[in-house]
Image (cartoon, grey):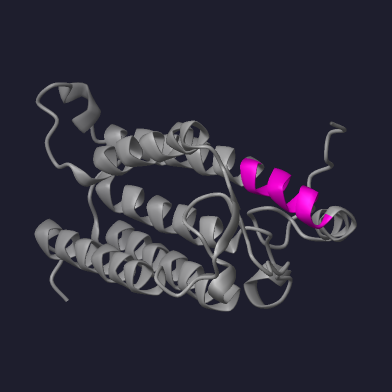
Amino acid sequence: MPHDADFYRHLILGAWVAWALFWLVTAFSTKKTQRREPSSTRLAYVLPLLVGGLLIGVRHTPWAPVLALRLWPRSPAVYCVGFALLIAGLAFAIWARVHLGRNWSGAVTVKEGHELIRTGPYRRVRHPIYSGILAAVIGTALCSGTLRSVLGFLIIAIALTRKLHMEEAFMREEFPAQYEEYSRQVPALIPFTRPAARRPP
């Protein structure tokens, strides 16, 4: 297998494009929305997600050359580990998306006839789509090895954590007793870890 940086870059881009196309196609088969977050709160995580994605995706940053600083050297082993993590993360997110079915939404919403899914990947973590995306972003940043990619990951992680808290607030209102029990049993993002104790409101 060639160990050229451009070869891996094309593989990484292809994986993300394939994932994005799957996400786009399946977005049209969801339930009607019963309740949706305000547009202002959505921008609070959508804009950081875009910024983080651009930081990871752009190859040159002439406006801030320090962001191109390489934090670890290129090597075939690093690329292989990063790409494996990327594929595993995207596959986990797709599994969760398929398992969530028509309850899914790109925004923070409650659907008509919304169900609390606790099976499949949702037995391991409460937010497996975010777990998968974050793993995929870590893999991409590992392949990049630059300061901008690590900064992009941190921004994306903060944005998804913010969105996660909004979703949990909606779920606790919709399924008060069930979601409280679910939160005590299943961690939010990292499988096989102990759920964090919830702070009282």
Identify the residue at horizontal 24%, vertical 65% (top origin).
17
Q: Is residue 1 above or below residue 45?
A: below
Question: Is residue 30 among what the camera can see?
Answer: yes
Q: Nearer the viewer, residue 5 or 58?
A: 58
| Quadrant placement of the C terminus | top right
Identify the residue at horizontal 31%, vertical 44% (top origin).
53
Q: Is residue 129 above or below residue 39?
A: below
Q: Is residue 49 left or right of residue 185?
A: left
Is 9 within the magenta? no
Residue 140 is situated, as x and y percent measured from the top left of the image, at 32, 54
| Numbered range of the magenta stretch | 166-175
Q: Is residue 164 left or right of residue 74?
A: right
Identify the residue at horizontal 86%, vertical 54% (top origin).
184
Q: Is residue 175 left or right of residue 56?
A: right
Task: Determine which quarter of the picture holds residue 114.
Answer: bottom right
Q: Nearer the viewer, residue 78 or 57?
A: 57
Q: Nearer the viewer, residue 128 or 7?
A: 128
Main secondary structure type of the part rendered in magenta: helix
